[in-house]
Image (cartoon, helix red, strand yellow):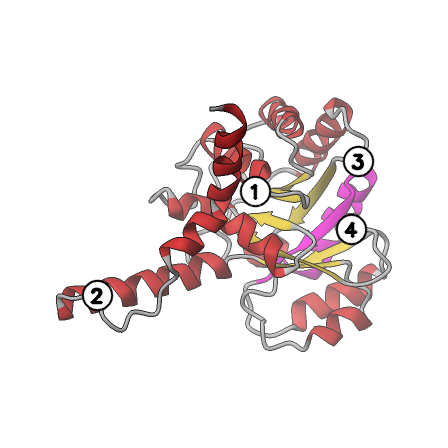
């Protein structure tokens, strides 16, 4: 998908059920969001959940779907050795790729207000090289997420870092911004001139028309956290309504049969007839 001639889209999921919903909607790929997986575990997006806990979530996601999953791998959960071990475990579970961000461990969410500490360029490049050397599947994708704009370090730093990451062997660059306009990203894309595939996460600059991404040869867009946010809103509304009304009338919720369908209850019934 990253080298597709057309703009591609992947959608966030955070457990097996949401991954299946993404696949059924027609998306070609799934974003295993660190924010969303952490949130559904009830912890902050600053590496409070261990990589083994997140890989367990991804294993359920991969088991229920057939489309590729790209993991939000934060900083790699340590140095090059931690990162390459994560790559090996993702490959073993059928995950298609991982995105590493060039920040120090433990990370802070890029859209929050906390200070952002970026990794040394040489150290991050060696982390990329180690992961590429260690991967077994030649199709496994490693994406470098550049946080120069997030840290306030500007365009020149972003270009310098991304050039180094490209030379280190990444399959694509994810350039990130928390501004609510497209200015920083547009400047980068024009200066970068499609040297290697670019991935965007337009969570904050969502009003930018999608055709603008196509015009500037963006390879992939990640809708990064919207299933989590929509499910939180739905649960809050439903829970408040039930608490207030003390009955279950007039609820806009899925049927129990729909939950059984998503769980593939029918498949078990068929197997029961065969094996019991």
Mark 2, residue position: 248
Residue nearest the viewer, comparing 164 with 196: 196
Q: CA distance from mark 3 to mark 2?
A: 49 Å
Residue 9 located within the stretch drawn in magenta: no
The quadrant where residue 68 appears: top right
Mark 3, residue position: 139
Q: CA distance from mark 1 to mark 4?
A: 23 Å
Comes first in the chain, label 3 or label 2: 3
Q: Is residue 50 left or right of residue 65?
A: left
Mark 1, residue position: 103
Comes first in the chain, label 1 or label 3: 1
Is there a contact, CB below 8 Å, between mark 3 and mark 4? no
Q: CA distance from mark 1 to mark 2?
A: 47 Å
Percent position of residue 34, x then y: 50, 45
Q: Which residues are magenta?
A: 154-177
Comes first in the chain, label 4 or label 2: 4
* Residue at 21% over, 65% down: 248
Q: CA distance from mark 1 to mark 3?
A: 25 Å
Q: Is residue 62 above or below residue 204?
A: above
Q: Is residue 89 left or right of residue 51?
A: right
Mark 4, residue position: 2
* Residue at 76% over, 29% down: 132
Q: Is residue 76 above or below residue 29?
A: above
Q: CA distance from mark 4 to mark 2?
A: 46 Å
* Residue at 65% over, 48% down: 145
Is there a contact, CB below 8 Å, between mark 1 and mark 4? no
Percent position of residue 189, x then y: 77, 64
């Amino acid at each position: 998908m990253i080298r597709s001639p057309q703009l591609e889209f992947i959608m966030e999921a955070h457990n097996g059920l949401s991954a299946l919903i993404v696949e059924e909607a027609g998306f070609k790929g799934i974003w295993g969001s660190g924010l969303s997986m952490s949130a559904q575990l009830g912890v902050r997006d600053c590496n409070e959940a261990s990589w083994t806990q997140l890989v367990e979530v991804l294993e359920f996601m991969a088991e229920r779907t057939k489309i590729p999953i790209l993991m939000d791998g934060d900083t790699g959960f340590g140095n090059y050795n931690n990162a390459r071990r994560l790559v090996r475990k993702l490959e073993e579970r059928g995950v298609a790729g991982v995105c590493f961000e060039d920040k120090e461990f433990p990370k802070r969410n890029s859209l929050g207000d906390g200070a952002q500490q970026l990794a040394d360029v040489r150290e991050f490049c060696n982390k990329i090289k180690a992961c590429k050397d260690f991967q077994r599947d030649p199709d496994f994708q490693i994406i470098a997420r550049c946080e120069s704009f997030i840290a306030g370090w500007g365009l020149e730093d972003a270009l310098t870092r991304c050039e180094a990451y490209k030379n280190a062997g990444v399959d694509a660059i994810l350039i990130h911004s928390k501004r609510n306009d497209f200015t920083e990203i547009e400047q980068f894309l024009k200066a970068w001139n499609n040297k290697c595939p670019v991935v965007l996460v337009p969570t904050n600059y969502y009003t930018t028309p999608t055709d603008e991404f196509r015009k500037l040869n963006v390879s992939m867009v990640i809708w990064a956290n919207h299933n989590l946010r929509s499910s939180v809103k739905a649960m809050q509304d439903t829970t408040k309504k039930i608490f207030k009304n003390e009955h279950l009338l007039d609820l806009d919720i899925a049927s129990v049969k729909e939950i059984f369908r998503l769980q593939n209850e029918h498949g078990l019934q068929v197997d029961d007839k065969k094996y019991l």
